[in-house]
Amino acid sequence: MLSCRPAVLVLLLLFSVGLSAQNFTKPIGLPDTLSGTNFNLTLAPSTFEFFDGVATQTYGISRDYLAPTLIFNKEDRVQMNVTNNLPDTTTLHWHGMHVPPEDDGGPHTAITPGGIWNPEFEVMDDATTFWYHPHLHGKTTDHVYRGCAGMIIIRDDEEAALPLPRTYGVDDFPLIIQDKMFDASGQFIHTPFGDTMMVNGVVFPYIEVPAQRVRFRMLNASVERAYMFGISDNRTYDWIGSDGGLFPQKVTVPRTQLVAGERAELVVDFTGQAGQTVYLSSFSSELPMGLPGGPGGHGGGMMGHPPSPLDSADFHILQIRVVAANNNPSPQVPTTLVSHSPPQEVDATVFRTKVMTATANDPNLFVFDSTIFNHHHIDDTVYLGSTEVWTLINNTFIAHSFHIHDIQFYVLDINGNPPPPFYRGKKDVILLEPNDTIRFIGEFLDHADPHIPYMYHCHILPHEDAGMMGQFVVLDTTPVSVYDQLPTNEQITLYPNPTSGQVQLQWDQPQAASVLLRITDSNGRLYRQMQWQPGEELDLAFLSAGIYFVAIRSEEQWIVRKVVKQD
Ligand code: C2O
Ligand code: CU
Ligand code: CU
């Protein structure tokens, strides 16, 4: 995927559509920024001149198209005032942020036309690039396509201490990348695969960058299309961060693949290149099989949609004009960026599997676990404080992505192999190629609500809208109530309880094989993990006095019993 094939590339450069001589004549739009702790945002219909003299009907958030960039400081408490002046009910979701369910802006937090929504939350995430967009079930594609999407930049001390370009609009640029299609009168054609690229809402844009190191915050805000980004001269650059923040170490590459919803932060070195012109391009011919807009994937011309010449082609997106350096060039990017402490698999207490399939009667209707999204059905229950391993399986013939709200996760493995370096940061969107199995680990801390769920879904928006989505609630309960709610009749009994050491553990399922046994406290902290042979006595003398939970793993579930340890 990172391989560079110069011979093939030259041919594609000569023949592919997007690379033919286009005039990149419009300066890139730089979304204005909003910062502080009080943010006023208004979603409203508008018009925008993508082409001179042609008013295209759009939606925007406090802008005619797209939205201001929100700048949050970690640990600030922010107050959001969101007014919906759209002619339609909508929501506003802070994609990537670790906020309480009621503040997350998912499909359960609808804002009716004329309505106002006032979430208030603490910014708990590390420095990164997030984004925000509507999330009303069945309407997400429509509202995002029309223009409701913006970037969120989170700043923190750890990132601020690193020598990285970070002056917005000077050496640190948001690049919101989308494909669109227009009809003869210049109005949007609502199709999942456009034929016209835009960056920050500008068609055929150019950007002037100083002849020094420049940071690009890349957001694939397309509804469906994936990209294989690179610079047209095939240079390498430093890929420094992904969805949830900076990597432990920079990764030097010539290509960056982003599926819809994914972000990447790149530092490209233009030192000494004043006067030169290159392009940010997508080498979509190099996308792995089955990705949207790439070889073997869905593209234009499918299911009644107009064909798109961008599919599987290589095309320029943004002309980069290098101008004089400023007085403050950023030094070389350090190899080591920020420290990470990912949760460990041995600490996981819950293992879930999510299988992506097509439905039996429609090969183009994709779902999780054979179940189409139902707004009124909670698919999963997660207990606050737990560490979980999720196994994602793509049993379809095309690629999908998986996005989860509430948490950032770490990829454990992809088809049994360790993740590549650019998947070693925190993620909230991950690509699954056809037949992939990906395991990730995540911690569900801080936020719980029995009534308002968080979502997980494919971030190909037409798939999400059609029902490739599930939801989970996080419950603030201890494992003993987990036990009460388990849909199992199995029981384990512990005695004596309270105990000062030796206990008998009886399980009403007569069983010969040994099973996994874990001893935790009510915060889920692990004290011992072992294989336990039914009938075997347990010695708890090593525990200090307190309340603990003994859990044994039966089939796909944990059976949990509370035990009081005395001195
Ligand atoms: Cu970007 Cu659930 O969304
Ligand atoms: Cu999200
Ligand atoms: Cu999908």
Image: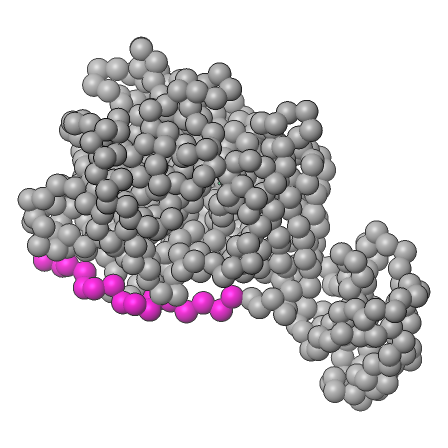
Question: Which residue shows up at 31% across the image and 10% down it?
Answer: 185
Front-lying residue, 78 or 11: 11
User: Is residue 330 in the magenta section?
Assistant: yes
User: Looking at the image, is 332 positioned above or below residue 135?
Assistant: below
Q: Is residue 564 visible?
A: yes
Q: Position of residue 539 (x, y in %)?
A: 81, 84
Q: Position of residue 233 (x, y in %)?
A: 19, 45
Kindly give the residue lying farthest to the top in the view shown.
Answer: 185
Question: Which residue shows up at 69% across the image and 78% down it?
Answer: 527
User: Looking at the image, is 463 positioned above or below residue 354?
Assistant: above
Q: Which residues are magenta?
A: 327-342
Quarter of the image for the C terminus: give it: bottom right
Q: Is residue 416 left or right of residue 60?
A: right
The mark tally for this picture is 0
Q: Is residue 41 left or right of residue 466?
A: left
Front-lying residue, 176 or 8: 8
User: Is residue 446 in the magenta section?
Assistant: no
Q: Is residue 135 visible?
A: no
Q: Position of residue 294 (x, y in %)?
A: 40, 34
Q: Is residue 187 left or right of residue 566?
A: left
Question: Which residue shows up at 51% across the image and 39% down it?
Answer: 399
User: Looking at the image, is 485 positioned above or below residue 134?
Assistant: below
Front-lying residue, 404 or 239: 239
Question: Which residue shows up at 61% across the image and 27% down it?
Answer: 363
